[in-house]
Image: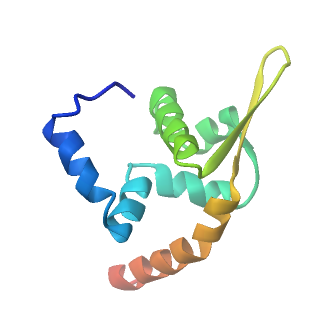
Amino acid sequence: MGVRKKASTYSLNEQFITECDLTYAVNMLAGRWKLQLLARLSKKTYRFHELSEAYPHITERMLSMQLKALEQDGLVIRTVYAEVPPRVEYTLTERAVELMPILDRLSAWGKKQRGK
């Protein structure tokens, strides 16, 4: 992520976002693919290549950005193994595991609203 000016509108608004617990939580999960990635990682540990194959419609750059954001927010652990070629694995943190029942309920609510 780039460095933002402290006086920018985004930076000033971000200060207020973090004061509301609900907005803080939703903002942490905001991102086109974050929820799908969390749901998949809730089942097992995945390598980057496996995630890339599971979501062929996501560019590798976007996948990498979303995983980095999840890692920065403390929801995903990225483990790099010193091998050739390098092996990188992603798994959920305890923080994310605690979140999964909430996301499961939100998913069930979404399904109900869509009439499925």
Q: Residue at x 47, y 27 (%)?
A: 61
Of residue 23 and residue 53, the one placed in the foreground of this image is 23
Q: Where is residue 102 drawn, in percent x and y?
A: 53, 76
Q: How many marks?
A: 0
Q: Is residue 41 above or below residue 26?
A: above
Q: In the rendered view, how is the structure colored?
A: rainbow
Image-quadrant location for residue 5: top left
Looking at the image, residue 95 sits to the left or right of residue 67; the answer is right
Q: Position of residue 16 (x, y in %)?
A: 24, 57
As displayed, is residue 53 above or below residue 60?
A: below
Q: Residue at 19% across / 50% down in the picture?
A: 13
In which quadrant of the rendered image does the N terminus lie?
top left
Left or right, 21 with respect to 95, comes to: left
Give how far across and how far down residue 57 sits, in percent. Answer: 46, 39
Residue 35: x and y in percent read 49, 57
Q: Which quadrant of the rendered structure holds the C terminus?
A: bottom left
- Most distant residue in the right direction: 83
Residue at the top extreme of this rendering: 84
Q: Residue at x 38, y 49 (%)?
A: 32
Left or right, 8 with respect to 79, comes to left
Whether 105 is drawn above or below 57: the answer is: below
Q: Residue at x 61, y 44 (%)?
A: 54
Quadrant location of residue 20?
bottom left
